[in-house]
Amino acid sequence: MTARTNRPATDEPGATARASIQALQRATDELEKVQPLREDQEYELTESYRRAITRVVRETVEIAQRAPGEALVWARYASARRAFASDAEMARALGVHRSQISRWKQGAPVDPRNEERLRDLDVVVSLLMGFVETRVIPDWLHGLNPHLSDRRPIDVLRSGRLSEVIAAIEAEKSGAYA
């Protein structure tokens, strides 16, 4: 008796990834055609939702097309970037020049120190999403925080103390006073 596997019909390297990318591109094309379901729906809300879904699908395609190491950096960039109005604003938060962000997006390697900063920022943004409004996250990162002895969370992150920032987020979520 032979075991069955769910491998692609061809053993060609990358066949599964290419098939996934094509499926995502077809989904993106279909999303472009979506119209509001009812005239009484708020057009702005429907349009905002469609744009968000389209952006996520496009970013997923971009991630899938990258080498595994590049994909991880891109995924962290895309996740952390949700909280910033621009790459320049995100670069300021990370303490790097905005051209560095552009190079990372194009697949340039990230030095270990900046990779750690990017990872930490991604973690913090992910924890804050849903707890505070997205547009407020940059202000939260740059504001003095009583749970961090009146230090700015972004400065604490830059010094490599992610656990302290996570503790501050958890304290605020639980309603604790500093």
Image (tube, grey):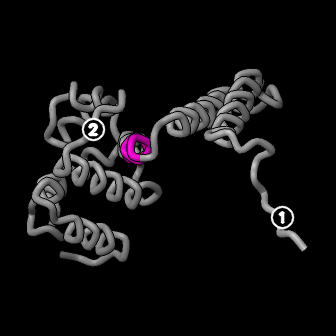
Identified by mark 1, the residue type is: Arg
108 or 57: nearer the viewer: 108
Q: Quadrant of residue 160?
A: bottom left
Q: Is residue 49 visible?
A: no
Residue at x 23% of width, y 54% of height: 116
Residue at x 31% of width, y 70% of height: 172
Q: How many marks?
A: 2
* Stretch in magenta: 69-76
Q: Find residue 37 and report its horizontal and vertical position in percent.
A: 82, 31
Name the residue beneath numbered marker 2.
109
Residue at x 42% of width, y 60% of height: 131
| Numbered disc in front, either 1 or 2 | 1
Q: Find residue 105 and report its horizontal and vertical position in percent.
A: 36, 31
Mark 1 residue element = loop
132 or 61: nearer the viewer: 61
Q: Quadrant of residue 44?
A: top right
Q: What number is the disc on residue 4?
A: 1
Q: Find residue 98 and report its horizontal and vertical position in percent.
A: 21, 28
Task: Give the Cα separation between the discs numbered 1 and 2.
Answer: 39 Å
Which quadrant is home to the C terminus? bottom left
Mark 2 residue element = loop
Which quadrant is home to the N terminus? bottom right
Q: Are marks 1 and 2 in contact (CB under 8 Å)?
A: no
The correct choice, above or below, for 11 with respect to 178 in the image is above
The correct choice, above or below, for 89 with respect to 1 in the image is above
Q: Is residue 91 magenta?
A: no
The main secondary structure of the magenta stretch is helix
Q: Is residue 74 magenta?
A: yes
